[in-house]
Amino acid sequence: MDPPQGFPHGRYLPLFSGQSKGHRRMRIVLLSTVAALVIFLACIPAIVIPIRRHDHAATDLSTSSTDNTTDTNTTSSPGRITIPITPFPFTPFPIPSDTPIPGVFPETDPSNPPPVGEAPGLGGLLPDFEQAWETAHSKAQAKLASYTLEQKVAITTGVGWMGGRCVGNIAPVADFPGLCLEDSPLGVRDTDFVTAFPAGITTASTWNRTLLRMRGIGMGKEHVGKGVNVALGPMMNLGRIAQGGRNWEGFGGDPFLAGEAAYETILGMQSSGIQACAKHYINNEQEHARTMESSNVDDRTEHELYAHPFLRSVQAGVSSVMCSYNLVNDTYACENNRTLNQILKGHYGFRGYIMSDWSAQESTMSAVAGLDMSMPGDITFNSGTSWWGQNLTDFVNNGTIAASRVDDMAERILASWFLVHQDRANYPAVNFNAFFPLDPATNEHVDVQDDHFKVVREIGAAGAVLLKNNGALPLVKPRSVVIVGNDSGSAIMGPNGFSDRGGDDGILAMGWGSGTANFPYLISPLEAIQARARKDKSSVMWWNSNWDLDGAANAVQEMDVAIVFVNADSGEEYITVDGNEGDRKNLTLWINADNLITTVANNNKNTIVVTHSVGPAILEPWVDHPNVTAIVWAGIAGQEAGNSITDVLYGAFNPSGRLPYTIAKSPSDYGAQLVTGGSPSAILSIPYTEGLNIDYRHFDANNIDPRFEFGFGLSYTTFAYSNLQVSTIRQSDSNSAALEAAWEAGQPTPDTEGASAAIWLHRPFIQVKFQVTNTGKVAGGEIPQLYLHHPASAGEPPSILRGFDDVFLECGETKTVTITLSRYDLSIWDTVSQGWLKPNGKISFSVGASSRDFRLQGTVPV
Ligand SMILES: *[C@@H]1O[C@H](CO)[C@@H](O)[C@H](O)[C@H]1NC(C)=O
Ligand SMILES: *[C@@H]1O[C@H](CO)[C@@H](O)[C@H](O)[C@H]1NC(C)=O
Ligand SMILES: *[C@@H]1O[C@H](CO)[C@@H](O)[C@H](O)[C@H]1NC(C)=O
Ligand SMILES: *[C@@H]1O[C@H](CO)[C@@H](O)[C@H](O)[C@H]1NC(C)=O
Ligand SMILES: *[C@@H]1O[C@H](CO)[C@@H](O)[C@H](O)[C@H]1NC(C)=O
Ligand SMILES: *[C@@H]1O[C@H](CO)[C@@H](O)[C@H](O)[C@H]1NC(C)=O
Ligand SMILES: *[C@@H]1O[C@H](CO)[C@@H](O)[C@H](O)[C@H]1NC(C)=O
Ligand SMILES: *[C@@H]1O[C@H](CO)[C@@H](O)[C@H](O)[C@H]1NC(C)=O
Ligand SMILES: *[C@@H]1O[C@H](CO)[C@@H](O)[C@H](O)[C@H]1NC(C)=O
Ligand SMILES: *[C@@H]1O[C@H](CO)[C@@H](O)[C@H](O)[C@H]1NC(C)=O
């Protein structure tokens, strides 16, 4: 049985540096606890220590010059900006102005989304969920008509930490059965008989929309099968810093890739009947001091980078959005009128609800800034108090908060429930217990796995990126194989031995924290390779110790091939592993990996390196070693990790994964770094001074050579590109003809509600066609990518990703690929007019195999 999660966990234990000794002790308990002790703790709820996230009420928030900072880049912030407790009027947001036009954009129900091949960027039509939302809101209004203020407030306020069987719970109210909210972005957390899917980062590195959709469908079905209403994912923060502890939960360092991944994941999840939750909104880009840091981001960068995946989520009909722990410009993200009301509900026309991250709510008045649901509902865990509940009722009764705001909050929550048809009579009841999985009365051990292991195995293989290959791969009947490294084998305490995966032992197939699920089993590379090698009668030896280098040197002598498995881990801040407080303390591989690889390579002329890493790592110590004949970047692949990598090594799967981030030669090459320092009493300021230049954009803009660039990945075959054709697509749409003409004339889009999501702005406008031919000797998949180059006056980075497809080709086969660009794709955000604008001058573009391997060039004909 998996260790239950009996102590405050998940996102819930902020242990940033500078906290009290009590907190530090708690951390040590977490780390030294083995499963048995955790079970003991879990079964006695009284031991759960309520931890205050931070204590605003009691601390002076004014700027202090005696902050204990360890980083010279730390600047003091002016202090938290709060919402005044004065009466606030409220007008609900009108719906976006577009109405469906048959044949131009189809009316869509979340249960029946358009097929993957009809993604907007592939020339397909943008689904229009407005009618589905409209119907859902009408049903919600009808249901709420007879509810009292107290009942509506109850719909918005969680029952408190551990007050129900799920990680978040809304109690039943009248004829509404309440809600179960459960982690995580890669599977159902805290329970059994579920699938441990590949992490977001590894799924993103497939660059395969079909696989992203299939994973979403599978995860959605499993959550529904367990009786969950709201699955807390996908995660779409951007990996602004390479060290970011939770980067692996998300989709990499580019907003377009993350946006497409979020879009497909949400369409898949919600088609299964689960409510998806786009998180963490917004600028929650590092774990250190996450509840006490202000991300200070300029308006253009916010719109073009960090908010983009959330816009795509809204376009996918997402039911809910989770606001994050941090502050944005000195205002907490969960009470930030600008990001919640103006951008998300206003400009994006979001019609679902916004929930707080766990204890990220900071005030009762957050309601007027746009927060709709308090999670888990109490001010601090088990405090028995709430910002909402009775407080919200009081604020309405004395006229401070408009009653219509609470109506709107409850309506948004019920509408999302109706949107994905959770009102159906046979919707499964909650049949697990996230806090007490060993309780026979409440955990029915329902098996929801189906055959999802198949897509797990495929994503693991498709997400593997072949970085180097001097002909060593694929393996062809090697006579002798030696498998080296701790990461190749099984963990001593089993796949779930570390609570919330907070440890690194054996094959790494998940990071740590609340973004995890329990493994039902975990196939190690050693196990899978041995099973495969039997077919060839290869001899298979192994050496698992990363520290005994003499032993490793001996073990690899005279072997046909040595495969070294290494890893790098990270996670959420409430667990520290080997000195990594969530964020990575460095970008090197773990457990003596560099020395191990070098030792093996010094002693075996056919050394293949496989990494299971949560993010980029510095490979310089050995990457050019002549005996390192191949490198496979295998990601964190979930329960089938060993099978997936074996499929790639033996050529059963021809690698087609591409890097979703840049691998640098030196940590300092990255454009933004982890900001350390801070204190429990002062807000740490994190200026996003790099602006638009994160990840590859920074390398391009500053002429820095990466080791392996964003979008890079090799195959066992080769591809040629040819026959570029560019044209415009002018769909007749009399509704928007004037707006289209104005845009083409260089006018910004209007500053109105729903304007950023307007269909005319997003539907296909430019069509780019070209041919890709498989010029090698085996069948394989290519990922053609399209990068825009704006005129210099636009102030954009040199190249920005704005399209990709995946195309599978037999030997010698040629296929035509069509990538379409919308007016939005071509636009930049104009901060003055608050609109999307076509920049002056010619926009050119390149099509190719990575962000630096351009094969065809063209110009946008407008
Ligand atoms: C600052 O840090 C030092 C060294 O870690 C410690 O001794 C000191 O107590 C800290 N001061 C404050 C104000 O936290
Ligand atoms: C401070 O920022 C500069 C520029 O962004 C960077 O070069 C430097 O390494 C940073 N210092 C620390 C201690 O992180
Ligand atoms: C944060 O401040 C910058 C600089 O003033 C501004 O451009 C941006 O819009 C602000 N963002 C939010 C969410 O307030
Ligand atoms: C909050 O945003 C809304 C929507 O844009 C706006 O109407 C309102 O004036 C803003 N409130 C404050 C206090 O800025
Ligand atoms: C209402 O909010 C205040 C904080 O402003 C808190 O101290 C109090 O306990 C809350 N009341 C209830 C009944 O939860
Ligand atoms: C309304 O009630 C809240 C909570 O008791 C209080 O903070 C606020 O000042 C009151 N406002 C008015 C106008 O009475
Ligand atoms: C892997 O290495 C770690 C750190 O040295 C060690 O604790 C663990 O026991 C090793 N696991 C295996 C399976 O060798
Ligand atoms: C980087 O951190 C990892 C994980 O804690 C550790 O194994 C490794 O030794 C560190 N590297 C360096 C160069 O300190
Ligand atoms: C490569 O491996 C062979 C053993 O097969 C060894 O003799 C040679 O020194 C190695 N090359 C390097 C550069 O270490
Ligand atoms: C993407 O995944 C789908 C589903 O398995 C598959 O049919 C397609 O061939 C894949 N694309 C490539 C390039 O392999």
Image: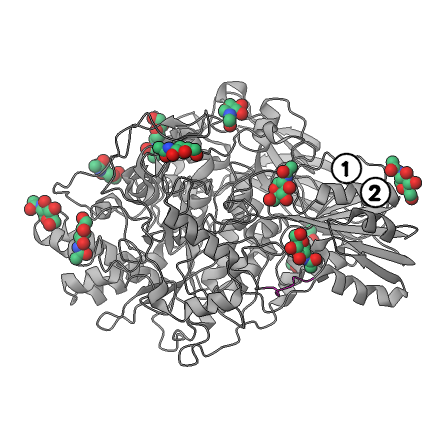
Q: Is mark 2 within 8 Å of ligand 9?
A: yes
Q: Is mark 1 within 8 Å of ligand 9?
A: no
Residue nearer the viewer, 599 or 281: 599
Q: In percent of the image, x 27 and y 68: which residue is there?
A: 171
* Kind of residue at badge 1: Trp
Name the residue beneath numbered marker 1. Answer: 622
Name the residue beneath numbered marker 2. Answer: 601
Vertical side of 376 occupied by 729: above or below: above
Among the 4 quarters of the image, the one containing residue 333: top left
Residue 280 is situated, as x and y percent measured from the top left of the image, at 42, 47
Q: Secondary structure at mark 1?
A: loop
Among the 4 quarters of the image, the one containing residue 317: bottom left
Q: Mainly helix, strand or loop, the magenta region?
A: loop
* Kind of residue at badge 2: Ala
Residue nearer the viewer, 533 or 526: 526
Q: Which residues are magenta?
A: 490-495
Q: In percent of the image, x 43 and y 73: which residue is there?
A: 432
